[in-house]
Amino acid sequence: MGASQRATISAMMRTCRTLYHTPQSSRILLQDGIMLQSDGQVVAFSRFMLASPTTRFHHLRALTFAKGNFSDEAIHAIKELLAHPSLSIDTLVLHDAERVVGSGYPQPAMLYDGGADGGAPLVDSFARLDTLKHLVMDGIDVCAAAVLEMLPSRLVSASLEYSTSVAEWSTLGHGNARNPIIHLVNLADTLEVLTGSEFDLPPAVIMYDVVYPRVRKIQASFADCWLPSVVAYAHSYPNLEHLVLTTSNSRRGRGPMCAVDSFMAGDLEPVRRTNREDQAKYGSWKGLRLLEGALVSVYALGLVCNVPELRLAGDVTRDTIRLLDAVLCDVRPECLSLTAVGGFMFDEGSQLTQLLANPEVQCMTSLGLELCFAPSEGDRDMAEITNNILRSLAGLPLRRLELTLNYGLLTNPCGPPSWWPQISTSARYYCPAAKYLAELDLDAYASRFGEMIPTLESVLVFRKDDPAGRRYLLGPRGRDSRSPSPGSSDNEVSIDPELAELGFGGMLDDEDDYGW
């Protein structure tokens, strides 16, 4: 039976009552976790678990609820399931958490008065789960936040995606509506990893009393595009080692992460200046070892501490070199990863070549560089550009170099763009620059770096013919028609078909008996 597929065991359990109660069959069905997203699934699964609790509950380690707005019968079944003394899950996932936790009240936020549960019947049930180590929530609002504030202190990791609608929060005047520092106070002694999106905190607050001494990694986006207060996070998460700044939902679709547009320009400099002044007065991180994020987000941090490894997301362009210069002065990384747009960035006397000669980059021992050639460079002399790259990097004390030459956007100066899908393979390389790069002897080119940089221990050179993610450089004609339309979701719930017949997994109508 151990070699049987889950779908086979599911079908056999439905027809054989002996297998239905066999511990081994329950283990195979439950060990990878369960998803419940309808009233029928919730009720049927609760009955299944309660029918033989001694042989089933200890196999269940992960539980997922989705969609929410459950009926009274389903709410009662959830409360029974979560209150059972044999339940010992270590992972809880709540998709559209506010609808799940707020089931029973169509507008739970309007009923919230700052009390423990805000009147939602499931808040207490979820908040009393004392075996959780990992929590994932999206669509957090008032009721879901109440659960966060009440959870007992055992959680090791939390992934929190706050609701994109702030209507309910703002009407309540909550300054800390999306502030994990406040919401996870009970977990301060155990939390180690914090991820999520749309984090925020009141601009007037400099620091909080709560400290999370075990948190080593934070990966999050922020409602205002960048971390609003470095000092608040540095004080509450003093032992942070890995910080990842992702793209805010409110920023997605506005353009490339490298852009400093009019929307951002008015706020960028004041935020950076305030962050630097506050850090000079109150201190910053002492053990931050890895920083990842878009150049503008890292620039806004205005860090005054050394960060050994810096990985820049998005593109560095001619317009943002000044930001890169400032960031390298801020953190003086030993390891740097970035993408530069345009071979002209390495022309003699360019801003980038001048930057690479500055004292603040002389501590750099590892460089990961992707050079994405601009569409207009199809008639450039690629031999000259590759020589310029050699010359520009020769002055660095590098021990490791990884260089990628991406010519996916190069266009034929005498014809259609080489990236057009209908262009044949032979026609693609009619573009002189693309043809040169496609035929370049990468091993020989790599050996030249070894000759120019005596400290090099490892050098790798790759080529790439991939325009993905950078068609914004082509203007309106280069937009990818395959991009998801507004309002579409990449988080569609996947279903385990082999579990459908047993009543959870979402394959049957609510009227079905689910085989329990």
Image (spheres, rainbow, N blue to C red):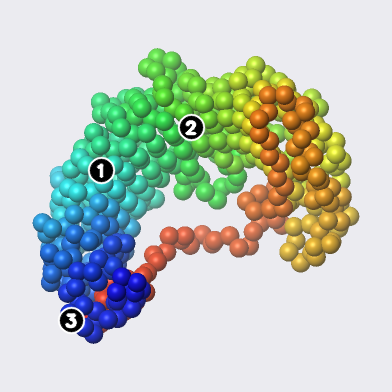
For mark 1, give the secondary structure: loop
Picture disc at residue 466: none
Instruction: Tell me if 115 is positioned left or right of 441 in this view.
Output: left
Evaluate if marks 1 and 3 touch, with contact meaning CB atoms under 8 Å apart.
Answer: no
Compare residues 363 and 352 and report the one nearer the observer.
363
Taking the spot 42% from the left edge, 64% from the top edge, the residue there is 492
User: Going by the picture, which residue comes out furthest to the right?
Assistant: 414
* Residue 356 % position (x, y): 69, 24
Compare residues 24 and 442 and report the one nearer the observer.
24
Q: Nearer the viewer, mark 3 or mark 2?
A: 3
Instruction: Tell me if 416 is positioned left or right of 14 in this view.
Output: right
* Residue 332 % position (x, y): 56, 22
Q: Nearer the viewer, mark 1 or mark 3?
A: 3
The residue tagged 3 is 17
User: Going by the picture, which residue comes out furthest to the bottom?
Assistant: 15
* Residue 11 % position (x, y): 30, 81
Q: Earlier in the sequence, mark 1 or mark 3?
A: 3
For mark 2, give the secondary structure: strand
Taking the spot 86% from the left edge, 46% from the top edge, the residue there is 379
> Is residue 291 positioned above or below 328 on the image?
below
The residue tagged 2 is 290
Taking the spot 35% from the left edge, 47% from the top edge, the residue there is 159
* Residue 209 % position (x, y): 25, 26
For mark 3, give the secondary structure: helix
Mark 2 crowd level (few <14, some 14–19, many ≥20, 10 Å Cα): some
| Amino acid type assigned to the residue bearing label 2 in the image | Leu
- Residue 280 sits in which quadrant? top left
Instruction: Tell me if 267 is positioned left or right of 136 in this view.
Output: right
Mark 1 crowd level (few <14, some 14–19, many ≥20, 10 Å Cα): many
Picture disc at residue 155: 1
